Amino acid sequence: MRKWQHKLHEVIYEADTFYGKLFDIILLLLILFSVSLVSLESITSFNQVYHDYINITEWIITILFTLEYIARLFSVAKPLKYMFSFYGIIDLISILPKYISIIFIGTHSLVALKALRLLRVFRILKLNHYIGESNMLLKALKSSRIKILVFIFCVLILCVIFGTVMYLVESDESGFTSIPISIYWCIVTLTTVGYGDIAPSTPLGQIIASFIMIMGYGIIAVPTGIVTLEITKSNKIETNTQECPYCLTIDHKENAIYCHQCGKKINYVD
């Protein structure tokens, strides 16, 4: 990489330097302002009064995001890799609606895609204090995914069983008109949501419902315990905000010189 590319990459992708942090703060404020503007635009009375101002402001924001997108392409060694990455696609989709509205009339509904800019906050908030914790949580969720899937499968079996029992115990007048409806009621009750659209009326049905409600509190705690156990097992590794300009890999160890994925240097050396 050339020196100017590395400097540009350091400002745009990193949060370890003064200019990198400043860029992220400005970008964060711009994203939050843009999403707020999209929300206000959906209010008919507000949009009718301030439509022209909103339109001009949105064009300014779109142009700024477009320049930022182009800068990101120039600051990486492989632009196509960034373009087809998750955040690269999000960046592109978030700026397209305004340009599409020039060509095609009646594409106002695409304004909702601008809210995708909010997803970019996850990339901006790459502060050292939080990276290790977020990586640990992701690893814990990945390690416990099989246990959680088995647990959910067991819960679904319980819902089918108890839903069928409630269908046999209760009458159609109570709302238990079919087994699927009864299973729906069981899921709502077991998860302690309790919409109240269906409720048992017989003493036996109420006893069963009470048992399901109490059991629901214990069931909710199980996934939390599974993930917590995996978190305590995992070893915390200190990482930084550096992103490889060649393969866009993150989560490098503190003071790392080479990318752990592609082996290229992540820091510019004269």
Image: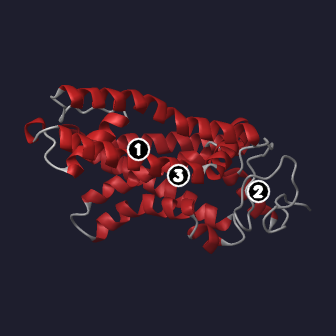
Amino acid type, callout 2: Lys
Q: Amino acid at mark 3?
A: Val
Residue at the right extreme? 270
Label 2 crowd bin: few (<14), some (14–19), many (20+), radius 10 Å: some
Of badges 3 and 1, nearer the viewer stands 3
- Residue 48 visible? The answer is no
Q: Label 1 sits on what residue type?
A: Val
Q: CA distance from mark 3 to mark 1?
A: 39 Å
Residue 9 in view in this figure: yes
Q: CA distance from mark 1 to mark 2?
A: 29 Å
User: Which residue in the structure is indicated by mark 3?
Assistant: 150
> At 36% from the left edge and 42% from the top edge, which residue is drawn?
37
Of the two numbered discs 2 and 3 in the rendering, the one whose residue sits closer to the viewer: 3
- At x 80%, y 42%, the residue is 238
Q: Nearer the viewer, residue 226 or 9?
A: 226
Q: Which residue is mark 2?
A: 7
Determine the CA span between mark 2 and mark 3.
48 Å
Residue 230 position in % (x across, y down): 68, 42
Q: How many marks?
A: 3
Identity of the residue drawn at 58% across and 66% down: 85
Q: Is residue 244 above or below residue 227?
A: below
Q: Residue furthest left?
A: 173
Disc 3 element: helix
The secondary structure type at the circle numbered 1 is helix
* Image coordinates for residue 33, horizontal then vertical, percent: 44, 40
Residue occupied by mark 1: 35
